[in-house]
Image (cartoon, rainbow, N blue to C red):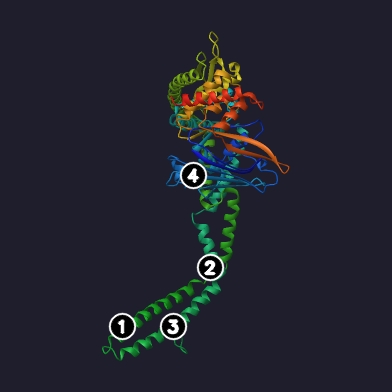
Amino acid sequence: MLSVLHIENIAVIESADILFGSGFNALTGETGAGKSIVVDAMSAVTGERTSRELIRTGARSALVTGAFTGVKALPAFLSEGGLGPDENGELLLQREIMPDGKNVCRVNGRPVTVAQLKALGRQLLNIHGQHDGQQLLDEGCHLEYLDRFGGTEGPLEAYREGYETLVELDRRMAALRMDESEKARRVDTLQFQINELERADLVLGEEEALEERREILRNAADLSGAAQGAHFALSGDEDSAGAVALLMEAERALETVAGVSPDLDELRQRLTDCRCQAQDVADTARDLSGSFDFEPGELDQIEGRLDLLYRLKKKYGNTVEEMLEYLERSQRELDEIQFADDALLRLEGERGKALERAKALARSLSEARKKAGKALEERIQMELTQLDMPKVRFRVEFGLVENGSGLNADGMDVVRFLMSANVGEDLKPIQKIASGGELARIMLALKNVLAENDDVGTLVFDEVDTGVSGRAAQKVAQKLAQVARHKQVLCVTHLPQLAAMADVHFSVEKGEREGRTFTAVESLDRSRRQQELARLTSGDHITEAALDSAGELLDGAESYKKTI
């Protein structure tokens, strides 16, 4: 869960530390006080898109820190990448936003990218804002919702592999069906490229070997001189003794007392070993000095060959290996064009098999989705009943993809959600039926159902109660209290029913100091909560009756929470 949120210089918030509880946390305040800025800060620290416009005027940067506790096991790609929690199940996320748009992100003090922060953040916290209702109206999102609920990732991945094979075959067949003039131009181009690469007689590792030989030839005089100098120092000449001869003299000097002193015998043996090694080094230096000789023109030949490889790399690949791969592809493509009729016949056979396989995988995926659709209908219906919408009917409608193959990247299904808000009315698309309040509750029901299938520990609701009031507001409050029994819930709200149901209640207030606007976030005790609920109900004119009503709301909420 998100235990601490530290905010510095985000919009009107100069500095704030918010200590969230483990259950239902509510944030209330006047419109424009900065409640949604708190949500923006949560979004920023979990890697979502943000803007440098969030930086408080005059500040050098903005900083958000989120401390998460009780973090469960994360996916392997995160934990193996060093982004997992410490031994106490704690994670510290930080994001600093600079005026130039750059970001500095850290996880437990370790620098990470924004993308890594986002991947981790999505495992920790889900934010459900007012725009989610618009996603529910977009039928293009309905299939994704269903797949998330049904856990059909496995069948979907298997289908997409089959579908990609089909798409690749279609691409290759389309390339073979080019007109004759285009085909002739392509054949000429391929033949030129193939001839050029074949004439080059490319060999793997050749370029590296040539560059090494060129470096030796460019420094041949220095290398040969160095080797000769080493040989001379070791072997000497007619006029001066080398190191080998001197070692031999020392060895003979000790031989005169051989057998008298064990220490001198050992020293003589060591000198013998040194002399043998020195003689071996001298012989090697002599041989190497001769290896640096080269034929006139060899360096020019190497330079010419490397220049050819350089020019070919600019056209066909960055390495000899890539150029050889290009040659192989070109030869294959030329064969396919020259024998296009035979290739088309073969590819058509392959495509027929690929199409049947893709359709079989699509049918398997569709069956899994339809089973999930029935379960989703039942779960949503149950949730809506608990949200005071017992007569609303919710259905998942399936249609077929309408194109030549009956398939697309998502399978063979077209899915949309239908509902009937009143008894006797036909089922119709949600966007043509739902009012604002109904849409908010359907979205809450859907989000709650989807949240059951993931391990994300914290759900954030940013004014998803828009358009809800009266008894429906009470039902929404009760539903959030139920969710908060197994998930941490953070809710920005204007409704007293929701605020009263919270386990922890924060007030977000805006004020002025020294000509600047400041926002403060404060945790409220029972007395302050009663006053805040009265304000939400009655506005600034708070009466005793409003306070009494607020107290009854709090008492009623406490009584309800004891029953769940």
Amino acid on which disc 3 is placed:
Ser
Amino acid on which disc 1 is placed:
Glu
Count of numbered marks: 4
Residue occupying image coordinates x 72% and y 44%: 514
Secondary structure category for the residue under label 4: strand
The disc label shown at residue 235, or none: 3
Query: In the figure, 163 relative to 473: above or below?
Result: below
Amino acid on which disc 2 is placed:
Ile
- Residue beneath disc 1: 266
Q: Are marks 1 and 4 in contact (CB under 8 Å)?
A: no
Please tell me which residue lies in front, 32 or 300: 32
Residue density around tag 4, few if under 14, some if 14–19, many if 20 or more, within 10 Å: many
Residue occupying image coordinates x 37% and y 80%: 274
Q: Earlier in the sequence, mark 2 or mark 1?
A: 2
Q: Earlier in the sequence, mark 3 or mark 4?
A: 4
The disc label shown at residue 91, or none: 4
Residue density around tag 3, few if under 14, some if 14–19, many if 20 or more, within 10 Å: many
Q: Earlier in the sequence, mark 2 or mark 4?
A: 4
Q: Position of residue 499 (x, y in %)?
A: 56, 28
Please tell me which residue lies in front, 330 or 560: 560
Secondary structure category for the residue under label 3: helix
Q: Is residue 551 visible?
A: yes
The disc label shown at residue 441, or none: none
Q: Position of residue 111 (x, y in %)?
A: 54, 50
What is the spatial separation of the Cα atoms under label 3 and label 4, in whole angstroms? Answer: 69 Å
Q: Are marks 3 and 1 in contact (CB under 8 Å)?
A: no
In the shown orientation, is residue 511 left or right of residue 26? right
Amino acid on which disc 4 is placed:
Leu
Residue density around tag 1, few if under 14, some if 14–19, many if 20 or more, within 10 Å: few
Query: In the figure, 527 relative to 406: above or below?
Result: below
